[in-house]
Image (cartoon, grey):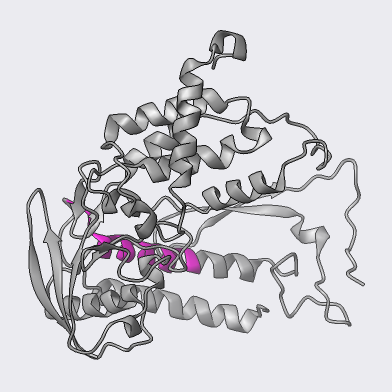
Amino acid sequence: MERSREGLEKALSEIPVLREEFHKDVRVLGGDEQLNQSLEKAGRVSDFLEFSELMCADALHREESCGGHFRVESQTDEGEALRDDEHFAYAAAWEFNGVGSPESLHKEPLDFENVQLAQRSYK
Amino acid sequence: MRLKLRIWRQSGTSGEFRDYDATDVSEDMSFLEMLDELNERLIESGEEPIAFDSDCREGICGMCSLIIDGRAHGPELGTATCQLHMRKFHDGQQITIEPWRARAFPVVRDLVVDRSPLDRIIEAGGFISVPTGSAPEANDVPVPKEAAEAAMDAASCIGCGACVAACPNGAAQLFTSAKVAHLNLLPQGAPERDSRVVGMVDTMEHFFGSCTNHGECEKACPKEISIDFIALMNRDYVRAKFSNRALAGRH
């Protein structure tokens, strides 16, 4: 599984359209006074349609490959994940600013005291 | 396949059976997929879909229920409703679908019941004493093979409540005994053996009916758990009640 700038930008252009279509066309029968499984499911989809946009935005901003996040633009000559510790040695915490507004980035730096960062080899 | 379904619909405290036609049912569908399809059609036509519980749909989570033609989890032995396939029914058949019927499980909506009294029993079982720190050497505590296998059989209980639904007394002895046995049979469960069985049985008695050895629970159980575990639980309970727990380390 890989992520590319092109693919992520395409997703970011399509998700808001899908979200708008969902909220316009969704059909939920019944009310909120008692157990309503349709409402539960609609709430979950609505959540995914917000969260997926953030996941893509986060993946686009992290211009390195790290763990399960493999950016095609950041790989070694042998096709292995290539980290960029100089620019991305932090956990990204995103602050919600309302649906459709870009989230604010808060960087939580990863400080290593006892071990040095190194590239892992699976060979 | 076409099927005539009589399904229990309940909103609030009273309910009724309603008739539905299920058309274009594939024999490869599971029973729950058949209900999913029906719900899709109901939503299209503007009728509220039928509420029913499900989660893993592979027979391990214990969320699905349903009394199908009077039998918990349907006509097949040793399967949960999610593992029941439509090929076990024939074209044109009428099928009656009800929620679990037991006083301890009030109906929440349609086919969904509240099974939280089973959680109260689990809570009453408490903890097991395990030393923290690094993992012990595996052969430090020998476990007889027969005990390990019996404990594993008991541990296959998924907590669905079919045993309660099938019991004419609404008793939860099979569930409780399986949960007691999968710890009490093993040396790791020995320190709290007495307090566990007393706590769980007393809590069970608070919510559920009494066992009169009908054995319907064993037939309904999707994991085919043996009622031998009920005998084991009764023995452990009596033993715990008569033992001097001040000396044995009372919890």
Spot occupied by residue A119 in the image (x, y as percentages of width and height): 89, 63
Question: Was residue A51 drawn as part of the magenta stretch in this picture?
Answer: yes
Instruction: Establish if B171 lies above or below B41.
Output: above
Task: For residue B125, say whether it is visible.
Answer: no
Residue at the location (12% across, 57% down)? B10
Q: Quadrant of the C terminus of chain A?
A: bottom right
Spot occupied by residue B83 in the image (x, y as percentages of width and height): 41, 72
Query: Which residue is nearer to you in this view: B133 or B171?
Result: B171
Task: For residue B176, say whether it is visible.
Answer: yes
Query: Which residue is nearer to you in this view: B42 or A106?
Result: B42
Question: Was residue B161 drawn as part of the magenta stretch in this picture?
Answer: no
Within the image, what quadrant is residue B238 found in? top left
Residue at the location (50% across, 23% down)? B239
Q: Is residue B26 left or right of residue A54?
A: left
Residue at the location (51% across, 29% down)? B126
Within the image, what quadrant is residue A6 found in? bottom right
Spot occupied by residue A77 in the image (x, y as percentages of width and height): 88, 82
Magenta residues (range): A34-52
Q: Is residue A92 left or right of residue A35?
A: right
Q: Is residue B7 left or right of residue A47?
A: left
Q: Is residue A98 left or right of residue B74?
A: right
Instruction: Establish if B48 lies above or below A1.
Output: above
Query: Which residue is nearer to you in this view: A108 or B134?
Result: B134
Instruction: Establish if B13 lies above or below B60.
Output: above
